[in-house]
Image (cartoon, grey):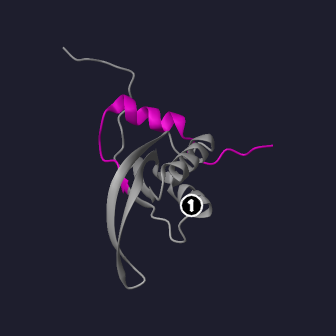
Amino acid sequence: MSDKTNEEAYTAGTSSVAFVTTPDKASAKKLAHGIIERKLAACVNIIPQIESIYMWEDKVNEDNEYLMMIKTRTTRIDELSKFVRENHPYSVAEVITLPIQSGNLPYLNWITQTVPEKAEVKD
């Protein structure tokens, strides 16, 4: 007996997760709202209180930051990165992405249904 559903199969890499760090909750929320309002992503999780240790201008730095975990279509990564760069408080914003290979099919379908493949043209 097979379980037939109307769900389409997911193609690995169709969606991606982008990671962005911010210095505070306010800037993370502002970016998240802008990203969602522009349909650049289906969901943004804001994870508080991460500790980052990194090299910057030949000096080891240690800061508390917020991590944004952004779920989007892979085809929209360039637009997402551009939006973050233009609206981020850091001079060099972290935007790194990983393709989603597999997961809960209804959730993955929701991402592709929520985020248009291309930017919507406004009149």
| Residue with the mark numbered 1 | 88
Q: Nearer the viewer, residue 22 or 110?
A: 22
Q: Residue at x 49, y 49 (%)?
A: 25
Where, quadrant-wise, is the C terminus in this rendering?
top right
Residue 115: image location, x then y, percent:
54, 40
Residue at disc 1, secondary structure: loop
Q: Tell me, yes or no, whether the highlighted magenta stretch contains residue 35.
A: no
Q: Residue furthest left?
A: 1
Image check: 27 left or right of 106? right
Depth order, front residue of 91/62: 62
Q: Amino acid at mark 1?
A: His
Q: Residue at the spot x=54%, y=53% of the render?
A: 27
Q: Position of residue 89 (x, y in %)?
A: 56, 63
How many marks are shown on the rendered structure? 1
Within the magenta stretch, is there residue 120? yes
Identify the residue at image location x=38%, y=32%.
107
**Measured from the top left, where is residue 13 in percent x and y?**
37, 50
Q: Above or below — where is 98 with respect to 2?
A: below
Query: Could you tell whether 110 is left or right of 80 in the image?
Result: left
Question: What residue occupies the far top of the structure in this picture?
Answer: 1
Q: Picture coordinates of residue 94 (x, y %)? A: 45, 64
Q: Is residue 87 above or below residue 32?
A: below
The residue stretch that appears in magenta = 98-123
Q: Residue furthest bottom?
A: 58
Q: Count neighbours of disc 1 (C-alpha within 10 A) and say few if under 14, some if 14 to 19, many if 20 or more.
A: many
